[in-house]
Amino acid sequence: MSEAAILITVGAQMPFARLVDSVDRWAAQRPDASVFAQIGDQDPPPAHLHHVAMLLPEQLRSRIVEAEVVVSHAGMGTIITCLELGTPLIIFPREGARRETRNDHQVATAEHFGNRAGIWVASDEDELVRLLDDRSRLGTEAPTAPTTSPRLLDTIRDFVDA
């Protein structure tokens, strides 16, 4: 496999400590796990994950191509890219009640995409740990390329990146 079998990304707008810290605790118990994380401006940073604050879009895309599985907030850019590339995705949505985002739009996004092949939703840390521990099975149900037109995907991607 590539440099990192598991890729964590929190998106470009803000850190997501609940996600990063959950995976960091998981990785502390599994020293053989290969994890790379894009964490934003999180302070303190994780102790058990190779990480950077930010990746350029082409760097993130390259890491998604190489990943065994991606774990992410419910960001549309990551969801679309994983669907397009056929990379299994675990969505760990930010929650409005925890002040991780302004409302529960990520929970709604996760619910909408959670029934697609190759996408799993972890609603809490226990479920995230279970999915990470069972990640070899996730690759057997990789998403298929979307039937949406490439032009529409490019338009959505341009909007998200703006």
Image (tube, helix red, strand yellow):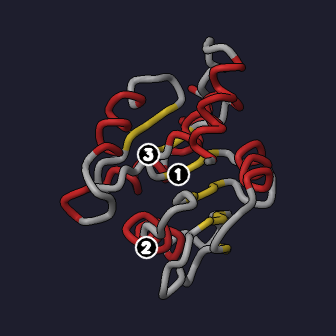
Element marked by disc 1 = strand
Dot 2: what SS? helix
Q: Badge 3: how crowded within 10 Å, few (<14), some, or many (20+)?
A: many
Q: Is residue 70 above or below residue 151?
A: below
The tag on residue 21 is 2
Could you give the CA–CA distance between mark 2 and mark 3, rounded to whole angstroms?
17 Å
Local crowd at mark 1 within 10 Å, few (<14), some, or many (≥20)? many
Relative to 119, residue 100 above or below: below
Q: Nearer the viewer, residue 102 or 38?
A: 102
Residue beneath disc 3: 74
Q: Residue at x 66, y 68 (%)?
A: 54
Q: CA distance from mark 1 to mark 2?
A: 13 Å
Depth check, mark 2 against mark 3: the one in front is 3
| Three-letter amino acid code at the position of disc 1 | Val
The front one of 75 and 117 is 75
Which label sits in the foreground, 3 or 1?
3
The residue labelled by disc 1 is 71
Q: Looking at the image, is 120 positioned above or below residue 84?
A: below
Q: Earlier in the sequence, mark 2 or mark 3?
A: 2
Instruction: Name the residue: 52% across, 60% down.
Output: 10
Left or right, residue 131 beside residue 82 = left
Q: Amino acid at mark 2?
A: Asp
x, y percent for residue 91: 44, 45
The answer to whether the residues at label 1 and label 2 have Cβ atoms under 8 Å apart is no
